[in-house]
Image (cartoon, rainbow, N blue to C red):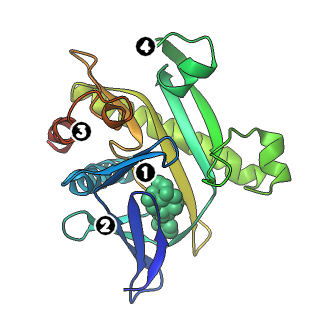
Amino acid sequence: MDIVHIGKAKTVYRTENRDEYLMEFRDDVTAFNGKRKTTVPDKGRYNAQISARLFELLEQHGVATHYKALAGDGRMLVKAVEIIPLEIIARNIAAGSVVRKYPFKEGQRLIPPVLVIDFKSDAYGDPMLNDDLIRALRLATEEELATVRELTLRVNAILKDYLNKRGLLLPDFKLEFGKARDGKILVADEISCDTCRLWLKESGQSVDKDVFRYERGDLITAYEEAAKRILH
Ligand SMILES: Nc1ncnc2c1ncn2[C@@H]1O[C@H](COP(=O)(O)OP(=O)(O)O)[C@@H](O)[C@H]1O
Ligand SMILES: [Mg+2]
């Protein structure tokens, strides 16, 4: 099959339908901009299933996504989009880089949620942007920027509520958006244990990629626990 993009954890393939791509969630895990990597069997399958469930949830709440269907283990059919090279991060609880860079305490509640927009660029190390930089670099129009901000806040409210009912806290997550052929802005990429911080409500234990980043135990046990809660 014709490859559109080989990323750090997924491969995107063209299909016979020009409006549709097949996204393969691989078992590769990377952190710190690819400086650490390994392969964990079943990781791709869990991330694909979790993403599918959360995209379905967003669609049920009227948020348009690129998701079409699961297509076998670790594979997902999606609408082909042109990715807007921004990583929109919503933070509800301080953890990770925000604690290293600013005087927040790990675990501190951030009310209202804090949105941060990074430049999606491996070559430049995903630096943080502001409105002027986004305009000067022509990464998105004012209207697109307003749309992705508003959508991220809506997605945050929907996910937080759904996960909370399943015993999971959502300290933060990253979204990517894309423009479909008809010009519509869709939530794209994935919403999974690789792109969300997820903490067990009862213990504060991480069930996300931090297990790999900070060597907090067995990654697949953590992803399995997250999947168990999110899928049922
Ligand atoms: N619907 C889509 N159409 C086209 N590209 C997409 C779509 N959804 C996600 N992508 C892109 O596919 C790639 C997925 O692979 P990934 O391993 O996450 O890459 P990366 O190393 O850039 O994070 C990303 O570059 C992402 O922006
Ligand atoms: Mg990615």
Q: CA distance from mark 3 to mark 1?
A: 33 Å
Q: Please name the residue that numbered disc 3 is placed on.
A: 219
Earlier sequence position, callout 1 versus callout 2: 1
- The amino acid type of the residue labelled 2 equals Met
Vertical placement of residue 165 versus 87, above or below? above
Q: Please name the residue that numbered disc 4 is placed on.
A: 107
In this rendering, position of residue 35 left or right of residue 40: right
* In contact (CB < 8 Å): disc 4 and disc 3: no
Earlier sequence position, callout 3 versus callout 2: 2
x and y percent of residue 58 in the render? Answer: 38, 48
Q: Please name the residue that numbered disc 1 is placed on.
A: 62
In this rendering, the label closer to the viewer, 3 or 2: 3
Looking at the picture, tell me which residue is in the foreground, 6 or 181.
Answer: 6
Q: Which mark is residue 76?
A: 2
Earlier sequence position, callout 3 versus callout 1: 1
Q: CA distance from mark 4 to mark 3?
A: 21 Å
Label 1 sits on a secondary structure element that is loop
